[in-house]
Image (spheres, grey):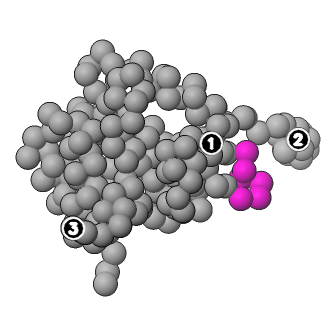
Protein backbone atom coordinates (compact mmCIF):
# COMPACT_ATOMS: atom_id res chain seq x y z
CA UNK A 1 0.00 0.00 0.00
CA UNK A 2 2.84 2.33 0.85
CA UNK A 3 4.27 1.87 -2.66
CA UNK A 4 0.93 2.79 -4.21
CA UNK A 5 0.84 6.02 -2.20
CA UNK A 6 4.32 6.92 -3.39
CA UNK A 7 3.41 6.38 -7.06
CA UNK A 8 1.52 9.70 -7.52
CA UNK A 9 4.41 11.60 -5.95
CA UNK A 10 6.92 9.88 -8.21
CA UNK A 11 4.80 10.60 -11.30
CA UNK A 12 4.54 14.25 -10.31
CA UNK A 13 8.30 14.52 -10.03
CA UNK A 14 8.78 12.82 -13.41
CA UNK A 15 6.18 15.04 -15.07
CA UNK A 16 7.88 18.15 -13.71
CA UNK A 17 11.35 17.07 -14.81
CA UNK A 18 12.54 18.92 -17.92
CA UNK A 19 12.71 16.87 -21.09
CA UNK A 20 16.25 16.12 -22.25
CA UNK A 21 17.49 18.64 -24.80
CA UNK A 22 18.06 17.30 -28.30
CA UNK A 23 21.73 17.35 -29.25
CA UNK A 24 22.95 20.10 -31.61
CA UNK A 25 23.11 19.10 -35.27
CA UNK A 26 26.70 20.35 -35.63
CA UNK A 27 27.83 18.11 -32.77
CA UNK A 28 26.07 15.08 -34.27
CA UNK A 29 27.55 15.73 -37.71
CA UNK A 30 31.07 16.01 -36.31
CA UNK A 31 30.56 12.76 -34.41
CA UNK A 32 29.25 11.01 -37.56
CA UNK A 33 32.19 12.31 -39.63
CA UNK A 34 34.65 11.08 -36.99
CA UNK A 35 32.99 7.66 -37.03
CA UNK A 36 32.89 7.46 -40.83
CA UNK A 37 36.39 8.61 -41.67
CA UNK A 38 38.49 5.67 -40.39
CA UNK A 39 36.42 3.17 -42.40
CA UNK A 40 36.38 5.28 -45.56
CA UNK A 41 32.62 5.72 -45.30
CA UNK A 42 30.57 8.83 -45.96
CA UNK A 43 27.71 10.29 -43.91
CA UNK A 44 24.10 10.03 -45.03
CA UNK A 45 22.22 12.86 -43.33
CA UNK A 46 18.45 12.42 -43.35
CA UNK A 47 16.10 15.13 -42.10
CA UNK A 48 12.87 13.83 -40.57
CA UNK A 49 10.13 14.48 -37.99
CA UNK A 50 8.07 12.23 -35.74
CA UNK A 51 4.78 13.14 -37.46
CA UNK A 52 6.11 12.41 -40.99
CA UNK A 53 4.77 9.05 -42.13
CA UNK A 54 7.03 9.08 -45.22
CA UNK A 55 10.04 9.62 -42.95
CA UNK A 56 9.05 6.67 -40.78
CA UNK A 57 8.56 4.56 -43.88
CA UNK A 58 12.08 5.40 -45.12
CA UNK A 59 13.51 4.71 -41.65
CA UNK A 60 11.82 1.30 -41.79
CA UNK A 61 13.28 0.38 -45.18
CA UNK A 62 16.78 1.51 -44.20
CA UNK A 63 16.50 -0.56 -41.00
CA UNK A 64 15.66 -3.80 -42.84
CA UNK A 65 18.55 -6.21 -42.15
CA UNK A 66 19.71 -6.59 -45.77
CA UNK A 67 19.57 -2.83 -46.41
CA UNK A 68 21.12 -1.96 -43.05
CA UNK A 69 24.06 -4.25 -43.81
CA UNK A 70 24.76 -2.36 -47.05
CA UNK A 71 24.15 1.05 -45.49
CA UNK A 72 26.42 0.33 -42.51
CA UNK A 73 29.17 -0.82 -44.87
CA UNK A 74 29.02 2.36 -46.98
CA UNK A 75 27.61 5.09 -44.69
CA UNK A 76 27.18 6.40 -41.20
CA UNK A 77 23.50 7.35 -41.19
CA UNK A 78 22.48 10.39 -39.18
CA UNK A 79 18.84 11.36 -38.66
CA UNK A 80 18.31 15.04 -37.82
CA UNK A 81 14.94 16.09 -36.47
CA UNK A 82 13.29 19.27 -37.79
CA UNK A 83 9.78 20.71 -38.20
CA UNK A 84 8.35 19.22 -35.01
CA UNK A 85 5.13 20.77 -33.75
CA UNK A 86 3.74 21.74 -30.37
CA UNK A 87 5.31 20.06 -27.36
CA UNK A 88 7.46 17.88 -29.63
CA UNK A 89 9.40 20.94 -30.88
CA UNK A 90 11.95 20.14 -28.19
CA UNK A 91 12.90 17.08 -30.29
CA UNK A 92 14.28 19.33 -33.04
CA UNK A 93 18.07 19.19 -33.17
CA UNK A 94 19.32 22.74 -32.58
CA UNK A 95 20.84 24.09 -35.78
CA UNK A 96 19.30 21.38 -37.98
CA UNK A 97 16.71 23.71 -39.52
CA UNK A 98 19.48 26.13 -40.55
CA UNK A 99 21.45 23.29 -42.16
CA UNK A 100 18.29 22.12 -43.93
CA UNK A 101 17.75 25.63 -45.33
CA UNK A 102 21.40 25.84 -46.42
CA UNK A 103 21.46 22.44 -48.09
CA UNK A 104 18.07 22.79 -49.80
CA UNK A 105 19.00 26.25 -51.04
CA UNK A 106 15.82 27.54 -49.46
CA UNK A 107 13.72 25.49 -51.91
CA UNK A 108 10.52 23.99 -50.60
CA UNK A 109 11.94 20.50 -50.30
CA UNK A 110 9.87 18.82 -47.60
CA UNK A 111 10.95 15.77 -45.67
CA UNK A 112 12.42 13.27 -45.75
CA UNK A 113 15.35 15.13 -47.26
CA UNK A 114 18.66 13.28 -47.60
CA UNK A 115 22.20 14.23 -48.48
CA UNK A 116 25.65 12.70 -48.36
CA UNK A 117 28.71 14.36 -46.83
CA UNK A 118 32.26 13.32 -47.63
CA UNK A 119 34.89 12.79 -44.93
CA UNK A 120 35.58 16.54 -44.72
CA UNK A 121 31.90 17.40 -44.31
CA UNK A 122 31.47 18.67 -47.86
CA UNK A 123 28.25 17.97 -49.74
CA UNK A 124 28.66 15.10 -52.25
CA UNK A 125 25.03 14.56 -53.26
CA UNK A 126 21.50 15.45 -52.19
CA UNK A 127 17.99 14.21 -52.78
CA UNK A 128 17.16 17.37 -54.74
CA UNK A 129 17.60 16.15 -58.29
CA UNK A 130 15.66 15.65 -61.54
CA UNK A 131 13.51 12.54 -61.30
CA UNK A 132 13.45 12.02 -65.05
CA UNK A 133 15.44 13.37 -68.04
CA UNK A 134 14.67 17.03 -68.67
CA UNK A 135 12.65 17.44 -65.45
CA UNK A 136 13.33 20.22 -62.96
CA UNK A 137 15.19 19.26 -59.80
CA UNK A 138 13.00 18.48 -56.80
CA UNK A 139 13.32 16.59 -53.54
CA UNK A 140 12.85 12.86 -53.90
CA UNK A 141 11.21 12.69 -50.48
CA UNK A 142 10.22 9.09 -49.89
CA UNK A 143 11.35 7.05 -52.92
CA UNK A 144 8.03 5.39 -53.69
CA UNK A 145 7.89 5.37 -57.48
CA UNK A 146 10.28 3.68 -59.92
CA UNK A 147 11.82 7.05 -60.92
CA UNK A 148 12.20 8.10 -57.27
CA UNK A 149 13.78 4.77 -56.33
CA UNK A 150 16.23 5.08 -59.23
CA UNK A 151 17.09 8.65 -58.20
CA UNK A 152 17.51 7.68 -54.52
CA UNK A 153 19.84 4.78 -55.35
CA UNK A 154 21.78 7.14 -57.67
CA UNK A 155 22.15 9.54 -54.72
CA UNK A 156 23.53 6.72 -52.57
CA UNK A 157 25.93 5.60 -55.32
CA UNK A 158 27.20 9.16 -55.80
CA UNK A 159 27.77 9.31 -52.07
CA UNK A 160 29.48 5.93 -51.95
CA UNK A 161 31.08 5.30 -55.36
CA UNK A 162 32.40 1.90 -54.23
CA UNK A 163 28.82 0.63 -53.80
CA UNK A 164 28.50 -2.49 -55.92
CA UNK A 165 25.70 -3.30 -58.32
CA UNK A 166 24.66 -6.12 -55.96
CA UNK A 167 24.45 -3.70 -53.01
CA UNK A 168 22.43 -1.21 -55.07
CA UNK A 169 20.12 -4.05 -56.11
CA UNK A 170 19.43 -4.93 -52.46
CA UNK A 171 18.34 -1.37 -51.72
CA UNK A 172 16.33 -1.12 -54.94
CA UNK A 173 14.55 -4.42 -54.23
CA UNK A 174 13.57 -3.39 -50.68
CA UNK A 175 12.37 0.07 -51.75
CA UNK A 176 10.39 -1.50 -54.57
CA UNK A 177 8.79 -3.95 -52.14
CA UNK A 178 7.84 -1.05 -49.83
CA UNK A 179 6.26 1.08 -52.59
CA UNK A 180 2.90 2.57 -51.63
CA UNK A 181 -0.10 1.00 -53.34
CA UNK A 182 -1.12 2.96 -56.44
Residue located 14% across and 45% down the image: 167
Return the residue at label 3.
133
Q: Where 59 sits versus 150, above or below?
A: above
Return the residue at label 1.
98
What span is in magenta? 85-90
Q: Position of residue 45 (x, y in %)?
A: 43, 41
Question: In the depicted view, which residue is nearer to us: 177 or 143?
Answer: 143
Q: CA distance from mark 1 to mark 3?
A: 31 Å
Indicate yes or no whether the magenta region holds residue 178. Answer: no
Return the residue at label 2.
16
Q: Quadrant of the N terminus?
A: top right
From the viewer's perspective, is 174 left or right of 13? left
Q: Secondary structure at mark 1?
A: helix
Per the rendering, the mark at residue 164 is none
Q: Position of residue 84 (x, y in %)?
A: 66, 55
Q: Position of residue 173 (x, y in %)?
A: 17, 60
Amino acid sequence: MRRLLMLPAALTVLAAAPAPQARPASELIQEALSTAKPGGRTVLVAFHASWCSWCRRLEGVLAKPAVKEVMDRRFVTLWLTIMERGPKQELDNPGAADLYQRWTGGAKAGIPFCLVLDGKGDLKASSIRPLSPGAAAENIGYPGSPDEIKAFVALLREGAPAMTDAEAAVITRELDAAKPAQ
